[in-house]
Image (cartoon, helix red, strand yellow):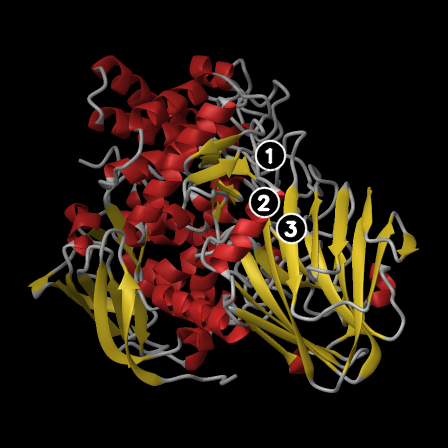
Amino acid sequence: MKSIRIVMATFWVMSWSTQFLVAQQAENYLEYVNTLMGTDSEFTLSNGNTYPAVALPWGMNFWTPQTSKMGDGWGYKYDDYKIRGIKQTHQPSPWINDYAAFALMAMTGQAVFDEEQRGSWFSHKAEVAKPHYYSVYLADYDITVEVTPTERAAIFRFTFPQSDTSYILLDAFNKGSMVEIDKSAKKITGYCRNNSGGVPDNFHNYFVAEFSKSFSLAHTWEDSVMQEGNTTAEGNHSGAFVGFPTIKGEVVTVKVASSFISPEQAELNLSREIGEADFETIFNRAEETWNQELSRIEVEGGTTEQKETFYSCLYRLLLFPRKFYEFNAQNEMVHYSPYNGEVLPGYMFTDNGFWDTFRAVFPFFTLMYPEFNSQVMQGLVNTYKESGWLPEWASPGHRGSMIGSNSAVNIADSYLKGIRGYDIETLYEAIIKNTKSVGPIHSVGRYGAEYYNELGYVPYDVEINENAARSLEYAFADFNIAELAKALGKPKKEISLYEKRAQNYRKLFDPESGLMRGKNKDGSFQQPFNPFKWGDAFTEGNSWHYSWSVFQDIEGLSELMGGHNAFVNKLDSVFILPPIFDDSYYGFPIHEIREMQIVNMGQYAHGNQPIQHMIYLYNYAGQPWKTQYHVRNVMDKLYSSDPDGYSGDEDNGQTSAWYIFSAMGFYPVTPGTQQYVIGSPLFEKVTLHLPNEETFVIYAKGNQKNTPYIRQAELNGSKYSQNYLEHDRILEGGTLTLEMSAQPAKDRGVNQEDFPFSMSKP
């Protein structure tokens, strides 16, 4: 298999309703992607908390090598030495953990099913990890394993040595599983039920595995007991062995698919997505699919490492949310509902935490994937109908993690940017319901809604954790609700209510410290107050991180802090202060604290989401050159394509989306508006192949490592002083030309009319 394929070709780049033809020298963008980026992580320190997912974009099933024990959220750790299997995974985060997982493993000699004993030594030197392909040499068995995916299936290729006893094992994992071996059909079927919550009682993942070679023996095991010769097993933890003699270099293929609906649907998924196709065919299809998506954004100039980081991040950005729907025998779209356990028509997506992804992931979809965004919105309609609530963290159903009602932001941003094809009135109804109460778990609806709606904030002293963070995020959601209500022609009284609530951030601003601070029910601020205290009133951060969470009204926040100069000084302080912390709320330094502490950037904690937009805020106060400096510094210092390539959790594409937007030269500070705030592009040229078949190009003349500053700008040939770009102007296509400099241009973007949107902006 060639490691580099550069050929003259004409290929299709998909748009949401049509296809446009791109004729050029085709570049294999997959060569830039390292799926091991971020895998050098553990509980105490995250360099991404990722795993090498072998998958198609937003695929229903991923596959990944498994180095850790069953049930460990850190399933693949870069520094581990042994592979236990290649597992089907649906894990969106180690903190949420996996569900519906099972694994395949090959071996020779004695049949061993214990996951610790069966593990084989491996080396990264004999490993290939790409989005569409994974290969590893199992040194203890002299076997090479390869896998390439479809959306709901995959094909494995095992290359064996000469052996009288070669085996392939299917481990259906614990928490309820079943396997059945059909020797005549060369097939293993069954189900697994493992999960970490968020599933109905009838939850199953049904699988089918078809082998190219007949079995000379078949064994199963059940709950740690081998059942030689038995072809069925069902219990807490079941699995199957099939064995055969092999000659040196003999290849055995296994075609695998699964379904959340039924065993018959799993068979149908396998027939539809693989059928009679061989490994090379599926490999080529997956390669083409990924190249189609990665080529939507072309970058030129920069170093090879920067391109590798860019396309590795773009790969991550296109993994979640996961498609959770299938096509039945009548080719109708259906899904197993992770909310009520029924099989119902229509779209369903899962494995996403909106607390992370409302910031840049979904704005990326509204810009580059409006059709996909519309499908996700249709899925949200179905989620609301099936559960009575909008999801905030789904995996696969509602999960009790994180805070906020940020689904409102995603919905409003989609509609306000002109995306249609879904029942917006039902979604608006769901949004309003969210504002009135908390759901069956604290992560849906609004925890503390009764206090927030009465007082304008969630009090510090009513035993609702992370109260100040909740209040700030509710206020931003209220801004989006107000904007959506205007677009839908809702009554003025309703619009005014949410416009007023969007200003609730003011209630938590402490004039004494110049920061956000928890407030008691009686209106007094919490005592004592330590702005370096993590958690408590805030979520995985401190007041220095959350005080900037006024996305809707940076001008208003600036006024509270004493005007533009004082505001800039406050922003500067984040980088000047030492990385001290108070971890008393948690009782130990959580990994996010360590990630801030060790990068030597003061209180700036890019490894977690709340502060990631903060460096763009200099644009709102007449000093855009400081944004340009810090954006470039963060890209250069905190990102690489290496296994330690992130400075904290990657989180469903959000930390990658920050890099993708920033490398292009702009960032969506305020979803729900039409603006992107300008930073400092990383490459000399970035070409966006837009879904409406237009092209938008960012030229950065003279762009080098030491020229992060924008001296002057032109948009479509006209001088451009604004510190932002409009969504519609990008979609129209055109060219943004920037002249880069080693010295800041302190006379550009300094006037009030150049500043981005704020509710309080004149």
* Rendered residue at 42%/63% (across/down): 314
> Is residue 322 shown above or below 214?
above
Q: Earlier in the sequence, mark 3 or mark 1?
A: 3
Q: Nearer the viewer, mark 3 or mark 1?
A: 3
Residue 264 badge? 2
Q: Residues within 10 Å of mark 2 (few under 14, many from 20)?
A: some
**Residue, disc 1:** 399
The Cα atoms of the two marked residues, 3 and 1, are separated by: 25 Å
Q: Position of residue 671 (x, y in %)?
A: 33, 41
* Rendered residue at 51%/62% (across/down): 274
Residue 166 badge? none
The Cα atoms of the two marked residues, 2 and 1, are separated by: 29 Å
Q: Secondary structure at mark 3?
A: strand
* Rendered residue at 54%/72% (across/down): 279
The Cα atoms of the two marked residues, 3 and 2, are separated by: 9 Å
Of 612 and 580, nearer the camera is: 612
Using residue 81 as the reference point, say whether residue 230 is left or right of it: right
When asked about the image quadrant of residue 660, the answer is: bottom left
Q: Position of residue 1 (x, y in %)?
A: 52, 83
**Residue, disc 3:** 207
- Specify the amino acid type for callout 3: Phe
